Image: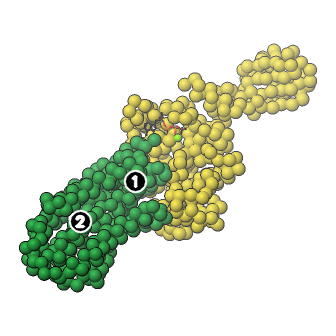
Chain colours: A yellow, B green
Amino acid sequence: MIQTENLTKRFGDVLAVDDLSLTVDEGEVFGFLGPNGAGKTTTVRMLTCLIGPTSGSAVVNGHVVGRENTAIRRTVGILTETPGMYDSLSAEYNLELYARLYEVGDPKAAVEKYLRMLGLWERRAEDVGTFSKGMRQKLAIARALLHEPRILFLDEPTSALDPESALLIRDFVSGLRKQGRTIVLCTHNLDEADRLCDRIGVFKSRLLVVDTPARLRSQLFGRKVVFHLRGAAKPFVDSVRALPFSQEVRAVDNKLVLTLDDPEAHNPDLVRALVGVGADIQFVGELRRSLEDVYLQLVRSS
Amino acid sequence: MNKIQAIVRKEWAQVYRNRLVLLSIVFMPLLFTAIPLIILYTTRDMGSGTAGATEVPPQFAQICSADMVGAECFQYYMVSAFMLMFMMTPLIIPVNIAAFSIVGEKTTRSLEPLLATPITTVELLAAKNLAATIPAVLATWLGFGLFLVGALLITTSNRLVSALLNPMWLVAVLVVGPLLAILSVNFSMMVSSRVNDPRVAEQLSALVILPLLALFFGQISGFIVVNQRVVLLMAAVLLLLDSGLIWLAVRLFERETILTRWR
Ligand SMILES: Nc1ncnc2c1ncn2[C@@H]1O[C@H](COP(=O)(O)OP(=O)(O)OP(=O)(O)O)[C@@H](O)[C@H]1O
Ligand SMILES: [Mg+2]
């Protein structure tokens, strides 16, 4: 759905996006993760033809950025960083205007559909100026969907929202994902990225890494498994080290912590081996690394 | 076409909800219609005196037709001076609307989602142009209509009325007026796509009235005589200026620059 090749954007001396080559597949939710000023918004703006790349190229939905901009604008939806609604006009008016600008066949029907879907139908006649941040954000998401775009760009959809509104929007996005839309999601919220995205690109001017959230975690740190034993764990370290698949093994009090490539495959053997040498196993668990650890390590080391 | 219409309607809906802008649109033509009527009213008793055209100062006589008597000529002279003021209506109204229309979009951050839609630059500018030009032209024509009706009621001099209805003023109001409005709109658009503060945009755009003010004081002081030739010349010059400005406004409306320059 989206292919970029060496996409680069400079603002004067500032290199905002450097040599970005990336593919986002159809139906995928792709997370763009990066610190402030990483160039997420700049990338989204390039892919939605709001600004032109300094060099490199991009194809969105089969259309070349810079050459078929109007065609691209027709088929993508964008939730901009700031909602940018007309405050003195009603929610309904705002959406109807955009439905017309996006050449929607039946503007009123589309507006009603999305206002209802986002729980704003009852407040449709009120000026957007009286809306809370969460309501504006919902309205802006509705606006991005009116023309049923195949690709949706969401630039920080839940920042500045309270946990409840954020959850509502996250649920809404998972709903969209089930409809098979391609979604590019910029976020600082690692938990959100972890839950919503099929793949995540960690980005800081350059693309640092792209992978699924689970693999990102395990690639960087390996996966760790903890065995809680009755009694000290130390005596069992050597026999566990002797197993072909075990990598790093440590004993802390009654806990045995080891790194494995594939815990699902190796845990049963491990349990058997430990029982065989007389260990009393109380619990087995995985020591999960949060995506936050991954992210911080990546961003700091870049 | 549909898109242009949608934006024009939106602009009007916004203006309609903005008291200040609305007031400036309504107030201006009313004021400029009232002033010459008041002049006619207060001078009506100088009436059909016996003084001949020979007695009026030479700059008066220059613009009066030969058969006008002194008082009529004086009235006509004053009124035509204020007719120039009246021509400020199509210049000033669009400044209020147009300065808001680009800078306003910038300050509310609504320009980005707008530019993300499939609307073309020409469509967008056409919509902004129409949204500001149409009310200005209508207000001008309406104001002139009101003035004519008022003048007919107040003055008893047919010669004065026919002098006011002469082709020169009709060309001024019907042709020069809209051309002035277009000039003003595109000038404001150019300014407001380059600055970030609506007030600055408005003040800078208000500079378009300077040439007209110069003409006004030129005529008051007898330095310039506004006659048919001057009006036709104005129309011709404005036509050229407008074409140039529209071309320039489209060229200068770089979507990316406008979007990224504001902070
Ligand atoms: N219009 C602009 N003019 C000059 N520099 C800009 C402009 N827009 C962005 N930049 C610079 O480009 C870099 C990337 O900015 P961008 O807004 O894309 O980051 P971001 O990842 O979206 O950040 P945030 O998480 O804060 O939204 C920053 O260094 C920023 O200062
Ligand atoms: Mg951003």
Question: Which residue is drawn at the image coordinates 55% and 55% (left, top)?
Answer: A140
* First-in-chain label (2 vs 1): 2
The answer to whether residue B167 of the structure is visible from this angle is no
Please state if B179 lies on the left or on the right of B54 as rendered.
Answer: right
* 2 vs 1, front mark: 2
- Looking at the rendering, which quadrant does residue B95 occupy? bottom left
Mark 2 and mark 1: Cα distance apart in space: 29 Å
Q: Which residue is mark 1?
A: B102
Residue A82 percent across, percent down from the top left: 53, 48
Q: What amino acid type is highlighted by mark number 1?
A: Ile
Residue A228 percent across, percent down from the top left: 86, 26
| Local crowd size for mark 2, using a 10 Å CA cut-off: few (<14), some (14–19), many (≥20) | many
Q: Nearer the viewer, residue A21 or B122?
A: B122
Question: Which residue is drawn at the image coordinates 89% and 18% (left, top)?
Answer: A232
Q: Nearer the viewer, residue A108 or B193?
A: B193
Q: Tell me the subunit letter for badge 1.
A: B
Residue A292 percent across, percent down from the top left: 66, 32
Q: Which residue is mark 2?
A: B84
Element marked by disc 2: helix
Please state if A264 lies on the left or on the right of A228 as rendered.
Answer: left
